[in-house]
Image: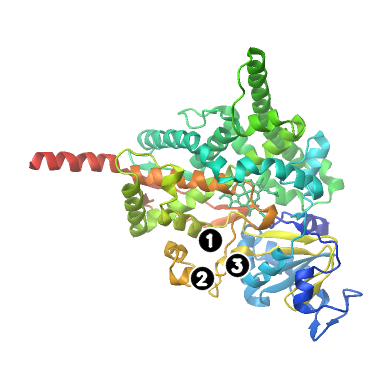
């Protein structure tokens, strides 16, 4: 039973696979001068002057030991931490057994680079049976997260340009800035109504609404009212459904597919997916109706993401719906949690916050609202986001599966269909790559700095790597930069006076284990008081 669960994925990794036409990836084979080929995974392979070991020679915890770690020692909700502990015990390459399934864990930047650089034409993370199972059940199309092979490549080639090309992404600045303005009003309202004039409780919960509103404004050019005083029920339900889907995913995969229909939480899992697709479908239908009206009236059809997808007719409406649903769900918890962690640290590190406030105020003085051009001149802001993602990579463990080729990683040769778990969280906290790894030090990311020059390019890759890397990277960055810079202009953020520290847990994604509550002190009042004091003095 456990083999299926862990095999198929998502217990603690997001995965994908490598494909090449030859047996052993060319780059690696020439590096290792691999001449003789593995004839069975149980024998050591002689390759030129190098002796490659096989997977059988790789050590690691047994099935029972792994179960003990997860459920006996309580690492199931903190599998990111288990990466660090196992790295200490077994070194940077070890295998974990779950019944007949074997996962190869990779916890060094060099070895992760080797795995990722051997990525084939159609990388796939994992087969995601539970997510794909829902789509099969409801006859829905796969999107970029769940599709594979040549079909995946086709979808990405359609979805990529308006998500990743800087000239397109910068066009979303106005829409996102309006959402930021509404978020600031909401912070004002929350402080007044619920926080004794300063506190905002459960910041991550509030930022989910921001992120949902933000991604909807990008995809649909529509406002959802998530940041109104009274949040629409549908929106609340959507955000709740995303959270439930991520929470249930690692539980569902514990069971073989054949028993899913009999599990009480499978019904709940299907219901939350139904809601995600329903919301996306309503938005897509609304857009189709808008376009049809314009066509009838002979008006030009202008618009960004969804309009372009529908008008270009490169995908069927069902395919558009499959992709839009996945973009929506990928766009909520990811950015919101990263912004929460950034603010959490800024509140605890007043010097870092002050430096950011100065940077933003000097580039955008007075009431000037930061734009994407302004952001390009804010290296401290960017360094803060990078450092936040190093300490809290939303995807703490990514993956790749070799599908139809053997590859060499380190001193080992791995057969096809090997599942590699890329332990990004462990690497982020490794002293080899980052000095004072547990300290929030954005300066390590500043260009020209000594530490930056020494950095390993695969030390922190929070958005993944290669052609299967995050589709929303540029939009996510723009959202995070625009909101953090504006919040800094308006507020000084201070920690929860109760002194509560917040730790992360892994629920597919890395999220805060408890609510992040922060004080937001109004800088506008301070500025007004300073002006008044100056006037009085004169
Ligand atoms: C802080 C924000 C975010 C982080 C850290 C993040 C991180 C990641 C990572 C690590 C992957 C896997 C990449 C790989 O396997 O190499 C991924 C995939 C993906 N992300 Fe993001 N993401 C973020 C925000 C977003 C947003 C806002 C969207 C939607 C607009 C999005 C959409 C996607 C999609 C669709 C994929 C699947 C791509 C594919 O398999 O082809 N992400 N993301």
User: Which dot marks residue 434?
Assistant: 2
Mark 2 near ligand 1 (CB under 8 Å)?
Answer: no
Task: Give coordinates of residue 35: x percent, y percent.
Answer: 86, 78
Q: Is residue 436 visible?
A: no
Taking 30 as reference, is 349 left or right?
A: left
Taking 383 as reference, is 36 left or right?
A: right
Task: Give coordinates of residue 371: x percent, y percent.
Answer: 43, 42
Q: Observer-nearest residue: 225 or 174?
A: 174
Task: Give coordinates of residue 465: x percent, y percent.
Answer: 65, 58
State the separation of the CA atoms marked 2 and 3: 11 Å
Q: Is residue 343 visible?
A: yes
State the separation of the CA atoms marked 2 and 1: 10 Å
**Residue bearing the label numbered 3:** 426
Point out the image quarter for the C terminus.
top left
3 or 1: mark nearer the eye: 1
Mark 2, Cα crowd under 10 Å, few <14 / some 14-19 / many 20+, is many
Q: Observer-nearest residue: 131 or 161?
A: 161
**Secondary element type, mark 1:** helix
Mark 1, Cα crowd under 10 Å, few <14 / some 14-19 / many 20+, is many
Pick whichever of labels 2 and 3 is earlier in the sequence.
3
**Secondary element type, mark 3:** helix
Residue at image coords 80%, 84%: 51
Residue at image coords 48%, 49%: 340
User: Quick check: 114 above or below 247?
Assistant: below
**Residue bearing the label numbered 1:** 390
Point out the image quarter for the N terminus.
bottom right
Q: Mark 1 and mark 3 in contact (Cβ < 8 Å)?
A: no
Q: Observer-nearest residue: 213 or 83?
A: 213
Pick whichever of labels 2 and 1 is earlier in the sequence.
1
- Quarter assignment of residue 48: bottom right
Q: Mark 1 and mark 2 in contact (Cβ < 8 Å)?
A: yes
């Amino acid at each position: 039973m456990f083999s299926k669960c862990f095999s198929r994925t998502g217990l603690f990794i997001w995965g994908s696979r490598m494909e090449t036409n030859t047996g052993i990836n060319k780059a690696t084979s020439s590096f290792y001068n691999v001449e003789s080929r593995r004839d069975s995974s149980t024998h050591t392979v002689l390759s030129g002057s190098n002796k490659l070991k096989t997977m059988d020679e790789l050590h690691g915890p047994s099935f029972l030991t792994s179960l003990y770690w997860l459920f006996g020692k309580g690492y199931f909700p903190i599998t990111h931490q288990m990466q660090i502990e196992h790295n200490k015990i077994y070194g940077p390459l070890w295998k974990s057994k779950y019944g007949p399934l074997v996962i190869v864990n990779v916890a060094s930047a060099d070895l992760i680079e080797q795995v990722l650089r051997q990525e084939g034409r159609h990388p796939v993370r994992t087969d995601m049976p539970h997510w794909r199972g829902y789509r099969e059940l409801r006859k829905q199309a796969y999107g970029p997260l769940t599709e594979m092979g040549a079909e995946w490549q086709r979808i990405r080639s359609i979805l990529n340009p308006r998500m990743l090309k800087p000239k397109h992404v910068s066009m979303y600045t106005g829409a996102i800035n309006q959402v930021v303005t509404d978020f600031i009003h909401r912070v004002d309202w929350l402080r007044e109504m619920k926080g004794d004039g300063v506190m905002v409780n459960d910041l991550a919960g509030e930022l989910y609404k921001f992120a949902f509103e933000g991604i909807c404004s990008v995809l649909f050019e529509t406002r959802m009212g998530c940041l109104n005083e009274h949040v629409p029920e549908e929106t609340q339900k959507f955000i709740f459904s995303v959270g439930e889907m991520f929470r249930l995913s690692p539980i569902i995969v514990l069971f073989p597919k054949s028993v899913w229909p009999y599990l009480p939480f499978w019904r709940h899992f299907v219901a939350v997916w139904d809601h995600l697709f329903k919301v996306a479908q309503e938005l897509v239908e609304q857009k189709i109706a808008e376009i049809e009206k314009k066509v009838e009236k002979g008006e030009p059809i202008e618009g960004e993401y969804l309009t372009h997808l529908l008008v270009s007719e490169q995908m069927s409406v069902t395919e558009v719906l499959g992709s839009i649903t996945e973009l929506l769900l990928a766009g909520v918890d990811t950015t919101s949690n990263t912004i929460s962690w950034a603010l959490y640290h800024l509140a605890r590190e007043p010097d870092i916050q002050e430096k950011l406030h100065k940077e933003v105020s000097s580039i955008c003085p007075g009431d000037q609202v930061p734009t994407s051009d302004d952001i390009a001149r804010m290296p401290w802001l960017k360094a803060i986001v990078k450092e936040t993602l190093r300490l809290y990579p939303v995807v703490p463990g990514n993956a790749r599966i070799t599908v139809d080729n053997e590859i060499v990683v380190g001193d080992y040769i791995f057969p096809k269909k090997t599942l590699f778990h890329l332990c990004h969280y462990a690497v982020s906290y490794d002293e080899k790559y980052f000095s004072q790894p547990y300290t929030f030090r954005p300066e390590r990311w500043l260009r020209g700095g000594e530490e930056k020059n020494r950095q390993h390019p695969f030390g922190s890759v929070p958005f993944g790597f290669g052609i299967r890397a995050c589709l929303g990277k540029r939009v996510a960055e723009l959202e995070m930069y625009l909101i953090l810079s504006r919040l800094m202009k308006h507020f000084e953020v201070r920690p929860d006076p109760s002194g509560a520290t917040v730790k992360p847990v892994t629920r597919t994604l890395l999220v805060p284990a408890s609510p992040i509550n922060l004080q937001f002190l109004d800088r506008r009042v301070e500025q007004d008081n300073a002006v008044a004091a100056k006037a009085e003095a004169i």
